[in-house]
Image: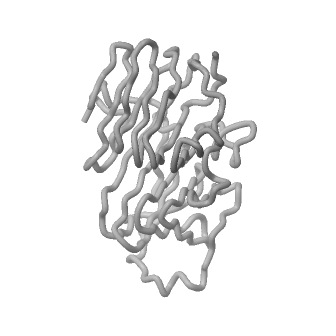
Amino acid sequence: MVLKRMSDNSFIYDLRNKKGWIIGCFKEKNYYDSYLQLGKTSFVEPWSDPDVHYHSHAQEIYIVLNGEMWIPVGKDTILRVKEKGLLLVQPNVPHSVIGGKGKIQHIGIKVPHKEDKKINVRKNESAINEGCLKKYNQNSINSSKGFLADLNDKKNQNCWLLGLGTATYKTKELCLAFMSYTNENETKKNEHDNSLHYHSKSTEWYLNITGEQKLLVEKDQITVPEGCLLKIPPMKAHKILSYSYPFEGFTMRTPIFLMIK
């Protein structure tokens, strides 16, 4: 699964055709991270979780790449997380997957997860059909419970969706941005500060969905292929050099600390 390990202890993980939890508190040293847990499904039929549950410490994030997922959050809210949708659920908020439609491909993230406990609240009812959702028809969530974003919307692209400061939704656990560029001119139009920098305590993650990107990591020029994840540990200087187009991907940082140029 590890496509390449660089001399500076950075890793490129090949996530293509992989499923289940991939990064987290596992025995395999190469896949270990005490803060971020990441997994994925790969074009599966809709399902229903056996239990409604909540997390004692972790935020759980669902990023739907294909298909649609139906997720109750709290008592009276059922959300349709559609293709290119992102849902964040805060700790101590009951939730579950109760169905969906289409072939589902999604990314799952939990942060921080090392001390987290998953608490089952009650057994889930059987998966529901689409007709049962009509009375809910909800596309928003109370900010105290979490955050729902449509990644097709330009306002949610090429900016920090999650994090501190100017981020759309404030969280101290994870910085996350969805990058979407159709050509080089669009990249330049939305270009942010991309100077060589490192993070003293944070790990930076680059997850490519469509296209590839090239980065400078210390003295190495690294190509991250489509469908792969690059992990850059703290204290490793890096910057983005170029993209192939069209490009879509996520930049994440855990935990949140300031960068140093």
Closer-to-camera residue (75/131): 131
Taking the spot 46% from the left edge, 59% from the top edge, the residue there is 64
Tell me if residue 105 comes above or below residue 184 in the rendering: below
Q: Quadrant of residue 225?
A: top left
Tell me if residue 178 comes above or below residue 193 in the rendering: below
| Residue at the outermost right position | 165
Taking the spot 33% from the left edge, 55% from the top edge, the residue there is 41
Tell me if residue 14 comes above or below residue 246 in the rendering: above
Q: Is residue 145 left or right of residue 198?
A: right
Taking the spot 49% from the left edge, 55% from the top edge, the residue there is 62
Q: Is residue 10 left or right of residue 237?
A: left
Residue 229 location (% of width, % of height) = 39, 37
Taking the spot 57% from the left edge, 54% from the top edge, the residue there is 89
Q: Quadrant of the N terminus?
A: top left
Q: Is residue 229 left or right of residue 159?
A: left
Q: Quadrant of the C terminus?
A: top right
Closer-to-camera residue (252/127): 252
Residue 202 location (% of width, % of height) = 55, 24
| Residue at the outermost bottom position | 131
Q: Is residue 164 left or right of residue 106?
A: right
Closer-to-camera residue (118/169): 169
Residue 109 location (% of width, % of height) = 46, 46
Tell me if residue 205 comes above or below residue 75 in the rendering: above
